[in-house]
Image: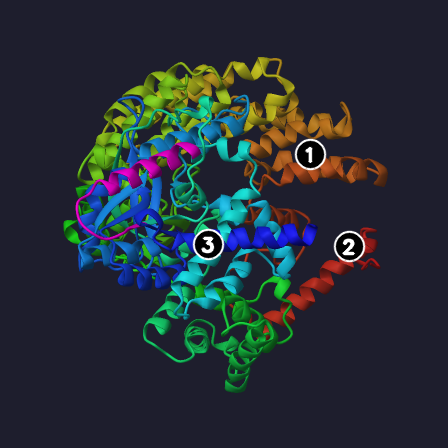
Amino acid sequence: MEAAAAAAERQDFAAYGQRLTSGEGGFFFFPIRHHSPACALHLAAALSEIRPRAIVLEMPADFAPLLPLLSHPDIRLPIAIVSVADGERASDERLPVGYWPFSATSPEWAALRLAGEFGSAVILADQESGARLAAARSEKKGEAGDGEGEPRQDEPREDETGPTLLTDEGQLAYSHYADGLVKRLGVRDFNEAWDRLFESRAAEKDWRGFFRDVGIHCALSRLATPDEEIAADDTLAREACMRAAMAKATALPGEGPIAVITGGFHTPVMIDPPAERPEQAKVQARPGIQTKSYLIRYTHDHLDRINGYGAGMPSPRWYERLQQRIADGHDDPFTEAATDVVLDLTQRLRRDRPNFTPPLPSLSATVAQAQALADLRGLHGPGRAEILDAARSCLLKGEDPRTGSPLMEALLAELTGEGIGEVPRGAGAPPLVEAVRRRARALGFRIEDGTERNRLLDIHRKPRHLAASRFLHVMTLLGTGFGRCLRGPDWTSGVATDVLFEEWTYRWSPAVESRLVALSIDGDTVERAAAAVLARRVQALGEEGQAKNAHAAIGLLMVAAQAGLARSCGALIAAIGPAVATDPDFGRVAVCLSMLDNLQRGRKALGFAGMAGPDELRLIAYRRAIDLLPDLETAKDEDVPRYVDALATLNEIAESGAQAGEGEQPLDLDLLDEGVAALIDGDLAPRAAGAVAAIGHMSGRVSAEALATRVIGPLQFSVGEPPARVEALAGLLAVQPALLKRTPALLERLDLVLAGFDEGDFIEVLPALRLAFTALAPDETDALAAVIAQAKGSDLDLAPRFSGGLTEAEMLANARLNATFAELMQADGLGLWLEERAP
């Protein structure tokens, strides 16, 4: 009974598969997988034979106005249609919401090309992209839960605004049936299973048998998917639209059949519409979102990434090669394509990694083994999996493929491809996209392919390089992801501001282009779009209660300045002044002062030369920091280190700014001296007391002897726990590390105290001492060591050396110096410190 039932079931499926291409009711049904060359080739053969009067194609209906453009002779694949949604509020920017990519192996592309050749009407049958986006956002919101961990208002909500792949076919690739098929065939994943079952048949001539088997496979996938899972998203509403498009096609005049081309998961309900239950009589889509659609360039590696989302094929360049070899009529297209890959891999390795180029016998063995694996697996010829397996076997020597291999990385890159498409100039791309392309090319950026490249920019001496830097920074502000700065001046933190060069890595990608499309509502030039984005980010600071966050506002000012927008920052500069002037936190104000001082010092490179605003902000921050100095007396224990660092910053900037440079106002050093004087006798934490005493000594208000007592006294008289005894010294070193070298009384007192320690006392305070002395820079450490050596009457030459190389005489002198130092250590009873410890 069970055997008979199984046989009857197989017969039913076979009959179903034959119905798909029998022309039943005037319809031919073609279940496809996106970007499958086998589907594309067999579909082309089928359409050439049946010559349909109409093609019902699963694509968003709102893409119809772009169909004439898709026949333009200047198109070079891959390309994509990007659907861009309007923001929900007037101040929102438009966001890229959905991609529909076309590759050379897309069945949809083959159908559209042949429709133009045959004069067939094309009806796009899917829901509009705005409805698809609304459904995707609703589904993602549901997965996000109760909203905990909400992002800031000025940050994109990844779960809602992340690009949606409109060709998603996860229901087909990740169904329970697909999982069982992978296990049954003993393959690694669904892609390999698909290749064995269908891509291996790409060169066959029986298109009816091919689509019969694809249809049965897809029907089994659907049967294995629970009804509630199908109903959980917009699948049912989309399928209702597709069936309505079929009805529309039947009303068209003319003779001939109608071709229905949809993702294979939907085909069963196209040929056999389900009986509607009363509660399902009206399947309505969620309210849609207003969108506009454009053609953009796409890249091979983005087609490959599609695979990670359950749509399309991996290694798109491999499938293009295979399809081309089949189209050219080669007797053994699979082996020919595999040979192409191996030869191109060799050229890539010779160019990029010559040390990894394999010898000719290994390359020949790779192709032969790929053929042998195909024979063993019952295939017409080697496919993607066979090439990879053969390469691991024949080309890897002494490498563990599980930990990564440069050679395998190169092979995967060859299988993926590095091509980037091209759209015709009349495709209606927004002016902003063309403006950015022109600017990029004029500044020497290569955007003709998707290859990542490096660029070294001499930003201080070459105006064109500075312009290129500002272009990269403005593209970063726009959120395009075009470039990434590897090294260069960091004006925000004040690090490496004297560096002459910036080094960037950059790469044109579909994400860059779609982001520019999304921003095209803001203007037709880079500057106008950037100004609009900057205005929104300023507005976002106010909307989330950050309007008085001077630190965030100054950081945004830095970003804008590096992007060349200094002249557009008037509103931002006007908002920073009051925010700094009312900030209640001394540490934060000092950080703001440091950032503004960096900005003032870099005003020429940042485009603020001749503008009074940044210098006035620096003065405001300086005065506000002085006003907050009394907070040192009431600082909490955990805030003391931060406040001392802030005092060090304030002191350093006051000293350097006391002499006005060109185009700036001097900082009044007396204001700092008076503020510190009021704290000298205050009730301060030990670290703060040491810092205040050090600045007081520099202003002449604290004598050298009094300074030594305040700073060394706690260490000398064991005041407090061992770490606390060093706190006052740590405060001095934090704000004026040179005082220890310049003040003999201070150094002599410290030397006397340390000499009087027994071994136990010294070991007890040593960790805190070492931590305190980390405030000294290497050159300051060298200078202090030289002073100590001189005071001790030593003939050791500890002056810092900056030689580019060592001569033989210098090496011998260093060896003698090392031996002398070892003798001194032994004499002081520290010889054990020089002994190597057993591991």
Identify the magenta region. Answer: 236-259
Q: In the current view of this chain or complex, which residue is farthest to the bottom?
A: 361
Tell me the crowding category of disc 3: few under 14, some 14 to 19, or many 20 or more residues within 10 angstroms, Cα based: many
761 sits to left or right of 735: right
Image coordinates of residue 212 in percent, x first then y, are: 45, 57
Point out residue 539 in the picture as x, y percentages from the top left corner.
32, 22
Name the colouring of the figure: rainbow
Task: Give the number of the disc on residue 17.
Answer: 3
Residue drawn at x 63%, y 62% as measured from the top left: 402
Most foreground residue, 544 or 96: 96
Q: Nearer the viewer, mark 1 or mark 2?
A: 2
Q: Can residue 659 be seen in this snapshot? A: no
For marks 2 and 3, the one nearer the N-term is 3
Q: Disc 2 designates what residue?
A: 825
Query: Residue drawn at (76%, 60%), measured in percent from left and top?
Result: 822
Q: Is the magenta stretch mostly helix, strand or loop?
A: helix
Disc 2 residue type (three-letter): Met
